[in-house]
Amino acid sequence: MFKFRVPIKISMMALAIFAILAATVFISSFSLSYMERTLAPEMHKKTVTIGESLHDVVTKIVGYGARFESLNGMDDFLAELNNEYADLSYITITDSYHAPLYKAGSTQNISQSEYKDLTSQDTTTILINGFYNTSLIINNMDGGVLGYIHIGQAKGLIQSRLQDSLLDIITVIVVSILFSLELLYFLMVFTISTPVASLKKLLKNASDGDFSHAVEIESSDEIGLFTRYINNALFKLNDSYYLLTERINKLKFSLGEKKVSAAIGGYIDTASRINLFTPPECMDKVSAELTMYIRPALFLLIFSESLSLSFFPIFVYDLYEPIYGLSREMVVGLPISIFMLIWALSLPSAGSWSDRVGRRKSFIIGALITTVGLVLTGLSQSIYDLLLWRSITAVGYGIVFITCQGYITDHTNLENRTRGMAMFLAGFFSGSLCGAAIGGILVGHIGYNSTFILSGVLSLAAAAFVARFIHEAKDEDKPDNIRKATFSDYIKVLSNSRFITLTLFSAVPAKIALTGFLYYTVPLYMSTLGTEQSSIGRIMMAYGIAMILLSPLVGKLADKTKRYTLLIIIGGVLSTLSLMILYFENSIVGVLMSMTLLGIAHAIGVPPQISLITEISKRDTSEVGVGTAIGVFRLVERIGNVSGPIISGILITVYGYPGAFVGIAAITFTGIVVFSLLFAFFNFRDRQLPDLIEEPAE
């Protein structure tokens, strides 16, 4: 009988998800129930407090001799008060006969007789015409009645607040699950997969007669104890070998080398020549370190930087200062473009520097620079301060970004590199998704400055993680051809026609869509629709969820089929369609649909890019290094990151938001068409079938 066996990783993750869901659902239901019971009384207290404050203002003015029936500027004062408290629907002041004198806010169809019915007591709250109306009496100095204050709140306000809280709770649940899965997956790799893989490699070496290796033990669990036992056995075996060798050498000296060699055979001499044994203190360490080791650190750092994604353009609006020759929209997009420009310029040199100094050291330094930049960003006092601090952040971010890609390249080959890059993208967008969602919630509670400072703390935590868990490669394990990149190296990489075609007409348009549309246009556009910060972050999650779910699957498919070009073309076409959705569906639903389809498009089209780059640039990477080649690719690709917000700002200024959507879609579509035609031409030129799904010859 066939028995289906669930892998232990899947079982543990399913158990973790179930536990998190059960706990959060229980706590959330209790919290919502408590909130529902206490929210109405608390809102009533707030309304009464506002009313009493207004009462004191009116009586003080009247006490100075002003006539209650003709208070100049009272309508404007009420309007400011109503705007200051967004949960108030209207404020009305009536005379002692309940005739309205001053009012602000929503138009109410409340008659004079109804106002009379609402004021039977000193302070009352009664539901009328869809509003909870709170009434207070205004007394004169003699204790007589001057008039009444009526403050209204919409009936659905409490339900709306509860709904917003429920959505925030759901967002936190999703982020908690993603956080837990990242941590759980790393713990399984660190405590089970890597030790077992290392032990397996060690036993394979021993079975082949190679006893010169040992496993570096980092745990004291059952696997660690067993590994320590095997290590000790190998240590004793090597000691015994050298003790035996010493005795044989003595016999050779006393009895003669030929006689001794004839007696024991040639194994001892052969083992010495090929280094099957080695002194215990000189034994090499077996390591099965996987690409997963870098992912939690990448997740943390991207999470820290992405906390501001959902509100950053709005944050810039608060610091806006006119800059000569630039529209407001372009000034708001300038910090994003400067960040992307500095990030791009740092990549080639950061890539070659990371190759030379090692991934561990470069990541830690990059994360520390990012920490400083994020904290100072939160303390910005002007647009110029902001540009400087974002530039510092971009340098650190660029170092970390290229270091992580180099780390993955170090630990993968052509057979699994797309899967490795898909894992990188999944970690990147998982952190981006969680950061954007949580940042939108946090900023409403702790403000912009505190959110940026928290971002800096999380970036510092990423550096601490790498310092603890990532081990630097030994000098002898590093490739011999690593050197500082020169200008001629960059020219050599860029002279590859396929390289430049892929970069300019596929990667660049994808980044224009990412930064110009997702990071810049969408938050501003949703803000014009009246969407709250937390809701902007939640809707932007759709892009990240699509990337997380599909990227690993596409990576496996790409590695299996090797049809990188076809997947890139499909991704480009879907990107165009996603951007056109908002031209026809100008609403929040349209934004959600567009975000989701763009995430699907980039999950299909982006992961194969690095694999295709490494395949079509084999000769170049053998001379200049993989880090340099990827750095050049990322540098040119960042033309899209830099120009995206600027292009979007110009399009919004001239054509409005619908024109911006169409303009970015046109850029994406043009790019993928040119990419398809040029790769077809290259295949034909190289005497291959002019079929778009065929890959270039090795």
Image (spheres, rainbow, N blue to C red):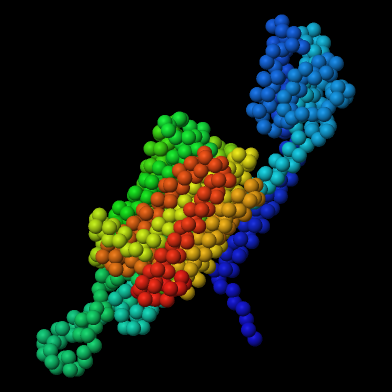
Can you give x and y, in whole percent of width and height, for residue 695 in the image? 41, 72
At a point 40% along the width and 61% down the height, the residue shown is 502
Tell me which corner region of the image, top left, top right, bottom left or bottom right, holds residue 679: bottom left
Q: Where the N terminus falls, by quadrant?
A: bottom right
At a point 38% along the width and 37% down the height, the residue shown is 388
Q: Nearer the viewer, residue 651 or 231?
A: 651
Residue 624 vertical position relative to residue 398 in the rendered view, above or below: below
Residue 202 vertical position relative to residue 672 in the rendered view, above or below: below
Q: Nearer the viewer, residue 78 or 467?
A: 78
Q: Nearer the viewer, residue 667 or 218?
A: 667
- Left or right, 132 with respect to 200, comes to right
Residue 265 vertical position relative to residue 208 in the rendered view, above or below: below
Q: Where the C terminus falls, by quadrant?
A: bottom left
At a point 55% along the width and 60% down the height, the residue shown is 574
At a point 40% along the width and 51% down the height, the residue shown is 638
Please identify the residue farthest to the top as the structure is shown.
Answer: 65
